Image (cartoon, grey):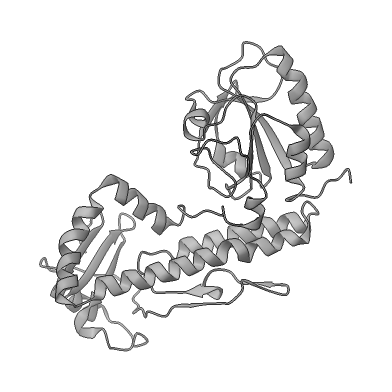
Amino acid sequence: MKEEKRANLYVNERGIAFIVPISRNVTRVIVADFLKQNESHTRELSLDELKESGNRIISTPLSLHNPVWLSRFGTFHKQVPSYQQDHVFFVGDAAHIHNPAGGQGMNIGLQDAMNISWKLSFVLRGFSPPSLLRSYDEERRPIGKSVLQSTSFLIKSVTSQNKFFSSLRNTLAPKLIEKDFIATKILERLSNIGFHYKKSQLSKKMPSQYLQTTGLKSGERIQDFTFYNHEGEWRLYELLRTQTFISLFYLDSLQESDKVLIDRFHKVLNVHYPKAVNPFVVLGKAPELCSLPYLVDHDQTLRKNIHMSHKDVLLLRPDGYVAFHQKELNIQEVIHKLSYWLLSKKG
């Protein structure tokens, strides 16, 4: 078909068509033809049949050729009762299946894999206790259930032929999607980056009563940030690729008295958790001279977006979620909270 530069959604009494550009030469075409809702999804799909259904819904004739993949889809919604059975962990389609509404299957499967892979890695390397693996089911199964519910609701909503509901849907949905706030929430939901683990038992053990309401808390996902130092630009997500916990110790500016505290904190981390925690000092203001490794939060993003203040510590999991946010560095308190995640080498 001709090249599309943006996604297009067509909804009317004949069905739904969703056209999404994937690359310069490939466009994804999804069609729900109301005339064929009761047909078996296991039957082979031809390009001519896809064109026929698409042209029934879209006023401009579809020009389709050279299909990469043709398939029908069903609306099965199933989930295993537990994502862990003895030494077996269920990930992606093995843990949950649902209709493709919203295109969430790949995203949720990849995030399942990331959640369990770093935990398995830490346990196998002796960094974390085997009990950490129990958090996989606790964190990911509620998200899988939520996606099953939302995709079920979405497919019922878009395929409903109730005249009142379909009229309301066709009139209201396009106007709502145009709102930036709603569009952002939808994208966060469909990409699965809007989910959190704040209700998990590990997150509940990491509270800080001194955090602002808007401060980033345990179980929440951190967005990517750019830092700077004398070597150039550093992206937070690049730091996370080290597959360690990341410790960010924030200082408005570096004072001589802080250097002793930083040195002590980093030595304690190295003694208790060597190779498991990668510590960084983040400065709100670039120092004139500094022998310590540091990053500069030049745009004040940590202060503005996460509400980190002088001497706060943010401990990030390898998957980009917050392990804990500690106000006013207390080394013993940090070691205590880390003990829920990691095994101390000091004993």
The residue sitting at 76% across, 31% down in the picture is 266
Q: Is residue 175 above or below residue 72?
A: above
In the rendered image, which quarter contains the N terminus? Answer: bottom left
* Horizontal and vertical percent position of residue 148: 44, 71
* Horizontal and vertical percent position of residue 171: 15, 61
Name the residue at the right extreme.
347
Residue 13 appears in view: no
Instruction: Name the foreground residue: 281 vs 121.
Output: 281
In this picture, residue 170 sits left or right of residue 88? left
* Horizontal and vertical percent position of residue 194: 45, 52
The residue sitting at 19% across, 84% down in the picture is 35
Name the residue at the front extreme.
209
Instruction: Name the foreground residue: 50 vs 313.
Output: 313
Residue 172 appears in view: yes
Instruction: Name the foreground residue: 193 vs 64.
Output: 193
The residue sitting at 31% across, 46% down in the picture is 181
